[in-house]
Amino acid sequence: MRQDYEMVIGLEVHAQLTTNSKLFSGSSAEFGAEPNTQTCPVDLGMPGVLPVLNTRAVDMGIKFGLAIDANINRVNRFDRKNYFYPDLPKGYQISQMDYPIVEGGYVDIELEDGSEKRINVTRMHLEEDAGKSIHDLGEDRHSHVDLNRAGVPLMEIVSEPELRTAEEAGEYLKKLRSILRFLEVCDGNMEQGSMRCDANVSVRKKGEDKLNTRVEIKNLNSIRNVMRAIEHEAERQIAIYEYGGEIDQETRLWDATKNETRTMRSKEDAHDYRYFPCPDLLPVRIPEDRIEELKKEMPELPDQKKERFMKEYGLSKYDASVLSMQRASANFYESLVNGNRDAKICANWMMGDFFAALNKAGKDISESPISPEQLGELMDLISEGTISGKIAKTVFEEMFETSRSAKAIVEEKGLVQINDTGAIEAIIEDLMQQSPENVQAFREGKTKVMGWFVGQTMKATQGKANPAMVNQILQQKLQG
Amino acid sequence: MSIIDTKTVEKLAKLSRLKVTEEEKTILVHELTKVMDMAAKVQSVNTDAVQPMTSVIENAQTPERDDAVSEENRREEYLAIAPKAEMGFYVVPRSVE
Amino acid sequence: MTSLIELSLKEVADKLKNREVTATEVTKACLERIKDRNEQINAYVHLTEDKALDMASQCDKRIKEGNARLIGGVPLGIKDIFCTKGDLTTVCSHILDGFRPPYESTVTENLWKSGAVMLGKTNMDEFAMGSSNETSYYGPARNPWNLDCVPGGSSGGSAAAVADYQCFGATGTDTGGSIRQPAAFNGIVGMKPTYGRCSRYGVIAFASSLDQAGPMARTVEDTALMLRCMSGYDPMDSTSADLAIEAYDEGLADLDLKGLKIGLPKEYFMEGLDPQIADLVKQAVKRFEEQGAEVKEVSLPHTDAAVATYYVVAPAEAAANLSRYDGMRYGLRVEGENLMDTYERTRSEGFGWEVKRRIMIGNYVLSSGYYDAYYTKAQKVRSLISQDFKNAFEDVDVIFAPTTPTTAFKLGENSDDPVQMYMNDVFTLPASLAGLPAISVPAGLVEGMPAGLQIIGKAFEDKKVLQVAYAHEQMCGFELKKPE
């Protein structure tokens, strides 16, 4: 992107809540059921039926508000947002317009260059999801509608237009997702659509304060796509400005296969949603004691965990940040350290071999073939000196592949480290006799040949000799 | 005051998903104007410092239900009253071009 | 001897309990009467004869076993706005052609639990939008007092059925007067309880913040008994009042009229009110005065803005409530060229003119640019109207008013001019906007046609309203016209 421009990005994130039932009905909210098997007259918008609010959705909303240090509106309200669409059964969506449950708050992000940035959140409101339309089943002129999703609770989280790069947008989404997952209110799966993102993008010359016309981009189903779409949209807008053109306020759709955005809806077609208070529901009133009770249920959040990891385990900010971003990895790490193992070595192993292996296998930490206890056993074998760090890598590979215990592998393959001074001395003396020229070279100051001796000793023991002891004995013997 | 002309009627008909004939538009301009002139009476009332009333139930809060699944699958019963359904889906006119 | 169908609801309930008659006999008598009269009156749009006889025989069985319920075996008419499982429920609209809901409204469920028998669905203005029953897709019901006259609306079929002895009571719904006005036009009792008394679950919505179901019957006692059977807290309606059900029919005569403070709102005795109706109200007041009640003039200063307020608020809610009739999941679909065309054809053919007009008015007052000037403004005026009543009720216990400015008008008389038609509701709208309990009881006849006295009470003082109405009924000496 041209250096004299900057992006102004605001994100609207829809997070599907992991409640058992829907926002306003007792239908199951579970993902993945057969079409239309999780519907009831309320979800289907049948005549005369009425919504009743799910208490857990409200609790989740409050928890999210607490997590981002926002203002919880003690009185908030549901409105009707009117538009026609076949997957919107009532012809309106019950949402929150004027009095959302949460206002304000912020999300702190860390960037690759180590800098930090605070992104303010405008608001978060609760609303019901719409159903799903499928356009490629059966004959051309028709669509097929599945209303299982209609009525599933959503949080819509709107950021201030404070994001300036695609990277910032990506980090904001990662952090938000991590908060939602820590709170266990949303599984954050963008591919399945349980977390969705629309981006509002505009560009301006650096140094300017004004907000230029923005374009809303929809259909972003991964963090990578959000970032790519933002980059492309910004380039498109800059090109238009450079040719003296104007940007239309419109909604554009991201096409991930063509790598471009295209017009979906122009400003002229913009909906007049005719919001008004939903007369079927009364205001939601949140007493202080409810908030106090929920505060007690709040888990440790990513930022708090990061701080604690730095303090308690002496980890660097970077390591602490990586390990605390996901609840599963943080839990794995803490089980691995288990109160007494070397925190630094554990961190190195996790972020090194372990993450690399997971990555290679395309697995999430929750699908790891080895448990923290198993990996811990390997750490113990290293620290007890039973095996060397180098051998440990081989053992780890086998563990990851077979899920077998480190001890079993070490025993079976006879990989136990040789810690017998006599045995190592015998090998070294043998070596010295066989190549007196190298002994001579060392004694003349060519200390580099030390490496040759170490290598030969290790080779002779199939890598099992305790490296520290090998070093020590060699120093002793060679110096004579 | 509001001016309801043919254009307004057309816009309202579209918002309402109603088809109106040219003849009906003329009648609607007349009738809606009459109704809205009557409704404009609200504008002559002094409402300074008055809160809008969204419900007659005052100071109440909306009841909240437990997050429990209380509905079972009655898909066939519901689809049976649909104008068109197949393969467990509602079949509707194509909603994208 | 009075024929079976002429008994009051209470009388027939007692006879059923005492096993002097069977539910089957009573039900058959009503069905016979309906068949005899429906061609002229058109009070019923969907008769549920088999269901009625089945329910009656179950009642008879229960009564035999000694398990008689409160109104066990009493046949009722049900306004076509209440969803009853598996039965045609159409709000007298073409758009719900053939619609048989897979669920039951709470109000009817409560009635069946009390032992009532359903005769069928009664005629009404389409989606309850009307004051004459003329907007019904099934053609208007007629006033049994004069077949050239309308029965009122929207619960016109229910009122006509009750007045014509085609049932012992009927359910109605009242959004701006839809129970009280037809009750007045047909010389029967009709009550709109306090908003929240009767569950709205399964009652097809017109304007949700105003809609309230209520009973219609020939006597105050019958009305009270029916209300007792219909009402009650419902967790499926978030606006339902969490209060215990009262035995409204007990102790109706216990109210001491001495010292009862009656308010007469000066704004209601205005131009357009038939002076003879005004006289009937004043006569009623006088009888109370003679019994020691105190009468005071009260002021409800925002009365003249009530019609305007109502015709902003109700259409706005209705426009959204009626968006679900899109031809996608149930009811009528008129297939078009594409999605938009299907929507438009379905809704244009499915809705009648009055409904379409109100949807457009609703979308107008909610659309950007007009929202504050109309919708928000109307909600503020609604606050003032509600406050007017609160102020008045500082000084009085109940308010007496005419139910309607005129007696039943001729069919077709008001159908050209929507505003003229809306003015019929001028006395009933304010209590609806304030959510207050209000009843219409027969006040007497004006040129051979019945007129109603409206009694409005404080919120949740439904019982007092019934007691006052009962006292009036005892003193008034109004006689319902006997069937020919």
Image: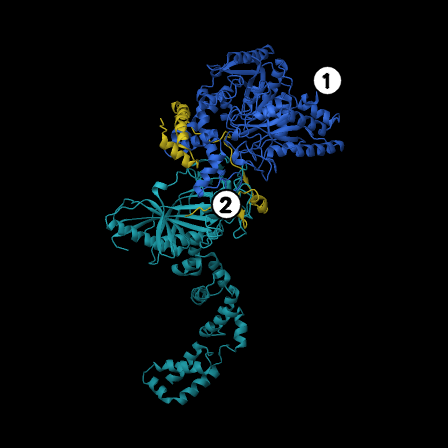
SS for callout 2: loop
Residue occupied by mark 2: A150
Say what amino acid the circle numbered 2 marks. Ala
* Front one among C409 and A478: C409
**Three-letter amino acid code at disc 1?**
Met
Give neighbour class at mark 1: few <14, some 14-19, many 20+ (Cα, 10 Å). few
**Chain of the residue on which disc 2 is drawn:** A
Residue C118 visible somewhere in the drawing: yes
Q: Which residue is mark 1?
A: C1
Task: Indicate left or right for C389 with C374 as reference.
Answer: right
From the top left corner, tell me how far across and down residue A373 is, in percent: 52, 65
- Nearest to the observer: residue C290 or residue A448: C290
To which quarter of the image does residue C193 belong?
A: top right
Residue C196 location, quadrant: top right
Observer able to see residue A79: no
Residue at screen point 71% across, 25% down = C14
- x, y percentage for residue C421? 47, 22
Chain B: colour as depicted:
yellow
Does the residue at mark 1 contact the one at mark 2 (Cβ under 8 Å)? Answer: no
The cyan one among the chains is A
The tint of chain C in the picture is blue
Q: Quadrant of residue B14?
A: top left
Q: CA distance from mark 1 to mark 2?
A: 60 Å
Give the x, y percent position of residue C324. 49, 38
